[in-house]
Amino acid sequence: MSKLQYLEVERHDAVALVRLNRPEVLNALCMGLMEELAQTLIDLDTDEAVAVIVLTGNDKAFAAGADITEMKDVSYQYMLEHGGLTRHCDSIASCQKPIIAAVGGYALGGGCELAMMCDFIIAADNAKFGQPEITIGTIPGFGGSQRLTQLVGKSKAMDMCLTGRMMDAAEAERSGLAARVEALDSYLAVALDAAARIASFSRPVVSMAREAVDMALETTLTQGIKTERRMFKSTFALDDQKEGMTAFVEKRSPEFQHR
């Protein structure tokens, strides 16, 4: 992996910790950062030593939004032709490995949208989420209006997108935006522990479980259940299913081979 300017990457056994690193601007998302993040996730996605990724910022900000100083003079023609920051969103959201967002402090605008691209969010008790784009004359552009509505419902998403208000960590957990809320001094450790637990399971089964859950947002209940049932049956072709169930019967820990 080439030298990074806007990110820090650490390895914790099969878990990769990716930290946004522009603390002087509350990790505002500039073009350089988004390019580095997209490429880093592509690299980690193809690294067989990595099973799970944790994406975080710092205790003051996960990411306080897009870098407005970089965006304010961009033309409509440029956005049509190049997409700006949005052109990197698909490569982030399409990562084939689980990504946990560990969110401390502000996750606003593009930062909130980036967290929602991850599989789930573990928030510190000081976390603040919001889509305040309307206050600067624009709307969410990284999928915020769509993912937020799927996660918290139309009424609350409308409230946030039309007023620009922030949602605290407790409300985020109640609303289904955050999976868990932890103390500021432990949220990252909790996220890393969750990632390590996921990494201990069969990778093909983890992949199927992710696909099954995502399917619920993409299709009807009937079709989703049919897809889940088909994937459930297919796990019985895996050595890991045999090992997992045998280990359960024998009252020992399974030794998954990821096949």
Image: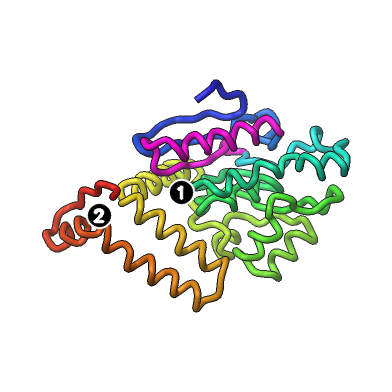
Q: CA distance from mark 1 to mark 2?
A: 19 Å
Q: Nearer the viewer, residue 51 or 177?
A: 51
Q: What residue occupies the far bottom of the structure in this picture?
A: 222
- Percent across and percent down for residue 256 are 24, 49
Residue underneath mark 1: 98
Would you say 108 lies left or right of 7 here? right
Q: Is residue 51 magenta?
A: yes
Would you say 53 lies left or right of 243 here? right
Find numbered disc 1 in the image and state the secondary structure of the residue it sits on: loop
- The residue at 29%/48% (across/down) is 258
Q: Nearer the viewer, mark 1 or mark 2?
A: 2
Colour setting? rainbow
Q: Which residues are magenta?
A: 31-60
- Percent across and percent down for residue 218 are 57, 66
- The residue at 59%/53% (across/down) is 116
- Amino acid type at image mark 1: Pro
Q: Nearer the viewer, residue 60 or 70?
A: 70
- The residue at 50%/25% (across/down) is 1
- The residue at 23%/54% (across/down) is 239
User: Which circle's residue, 1 or 2, is located before the other in the chain?
Assistant: 1
Q: Quadrant of residue 69?
A: top right
Determine crowd level at label 1: few under 14, some 14-19, many 20+ residues with C-alpha closer than 10 A.
many
Find numbered disc 2 in the image and state the secondary structure of the residue it sits on: helix
- Amino acid type at image mark 2: Asp
Residue underneath mark 2: 240
Image position of 239 with respect to 33: above or below: below
Would you say 33 lies left or right of 41 here? right
